[in-house]
Amino acid sequence: MYKKILVAARGEIALRIIRACRELGIRSVAVHSTADRDSLHVKIADEDVSIGASPSRESYLNIPRIIAAAEITNADAIHPAYGFLSENPNFADICLSCGIEWIGPNPALMKRMGDKAEARRVMDEAGLPVIPGSEGVISSEEEALRLCAEIGYPVMVKATAGGGGRGIRIVRDEKQLGDCFRAASKEAEISFGDSGLYVEKYLQDPRHIEVQILGDGNGGVIHFGERECSIQRRHQKLIEESPSPGIADQVREKLFKYAVQGGEYINYNSLGTVEFLVDSKGRIYFLEMNTRVQVEHPVTEMVCGVDLIKEQIRLASSGRFGESALNARITGWAIECRINAEDPDRGFLPVPGRIDFFHVPGGPGVRVDSHLYSGCEVPSYYDSLLAKLIVWGKNRDEAIERMKRSLDEFIIEGVPTTIPFLQKIIKGRNFERGDFHTAFLEREIV
Ligand code: MV4
């Protein structure tokens, strides 16, 4: 087992990973920017290294500084968490060539799945149903016109280097295609340095459901059930739950089968997520694969009784599944709300500031993953996630009641938060019915 792990991240997820290290008897190293010098992840880690100025580019995205921090502290491995460098195969390669182990899949797989058009092609080859669309990246506007006429409008144009919905456009008809194509291509070039696009048939009001998997790199892949992630705003998930309400058990079993099949086909060797869209008729389509731990992993942990981060670390060091991963069974229901420092009345504008008072809910079935404490500062440089509130209940009704009372108990003073907005959704009729087709959240796709 590793003796020391450097966590290349900040916020709640850095804390989460440091906690897993502590339980495994592994020493932890936190890295931090100037703005984060008083952050909780720095306080609870065994060691910490200051890696640069507040902007992410100068600290959490600064590869030489992070590698230097790992060398100075003699860390055996780096855990990239989510965000920042977690999906950067180049960073993974550099770690490995410096003799530092990478707690994630092998870099070649990260690269393949990071290219969304390539991922589609590979999963099609693996026998997964993919959304009708282009076979790879489209090379010209003329080719796009020809293809889209074949597929039939509406279509979606997506950046191959994007993912999670960044750099996508709906195209309603042929007349819009040229403009959308050029705009998306330019945007992709600016955001990702890769202008490559692919197209897919636009599915009307699908559900977004993902399956958590763990692969051992020897052909073994296990799954930990699904997560319903349909409640999003501008491609940011707001509420996730497991299991997904309102899909038939046959559909659920197929999702598991496809996720495992996909993981086996690529010989996946870490924690990962296979994302699907499911239409109102229960038809399943592969969407993307994420090669990192995800924000919403705790809902899976709550229903499976597994510590996914510990299992991921154990697997990275030994190449074998742990007993608790192999014995995981799904019990009850879990829901997660993401609480952000944003003002819903000002278009969800992120609002940094001092947390004057912080009180978390507790009691049976309640978990809060947060890096906040009374008196801490929320810097303006990073994403606005303040806390994840996760509840477990023996069934969905109990989980919903727990979520309502936990949101009521939560006190965050000093910055506006999305708590009132989440309360409105959770208390609403559509959420209660598990009916997300009706798009009760404003669903701006572009
Ligand atoms: C789609 C889609 C419809 N058709 N792709 C991609 C990333 C994720 N944030 C949502 N994505 C979508 N991809 C095709 N071909 C619709 C969405 C979508 C969505 C899907 C399920 C639930 C909520 C959604 C909100 C916006 C976009």
Image (cartoon, rainbow, N blue to C red):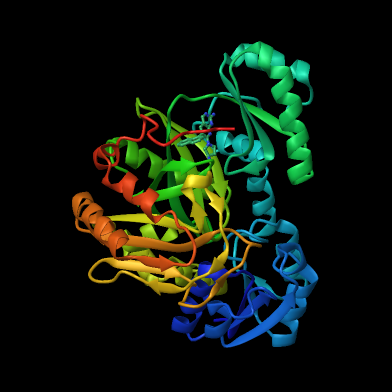
Identity of the residue drawn at 63% across and 33% down = 168
Quadrant of the frame with the N terminus: bottom right
The answer to whether residue 145 is above or below residue 200 is above
Quadrant of the frame with the C terminus: top right
Q: Nearer the viewer, residue 288 or 157?
A: 157
Q: Nearer the viewer, residue 93 or 174?
A: 174
The answer to whether residue 284 is above or below residue 384 is above
Identity of the residue drawn at 34% across and 68% down = 367
In the image, taking residue 352 as reference, residue 195 lies left or right, namely: right
In the image, taking residue 129 as reference, residue 164 lies left or right, namely: right
- How far from the left and from the top, in percent, is residue 16? 48, 72
- How far from the left and from the top, in percent, is residue 34? 70, 76
- How far from the left and from the top, in percent, is residue 440? 37, 34
- How far from the left and from the top, in percent, is residue 370? 45, 69
To which quarter of the image does residue 89 belong?
bottom right
Q: Nearer the viewer, residue 272 or 124?
A: 272
The answer to whether residue 143 is above or below residue 328 is above
Identity of the residue drawn at 50% across and 68% down = 12
User: In the rendered image, is residue 302 in sight?
Assistant: yes
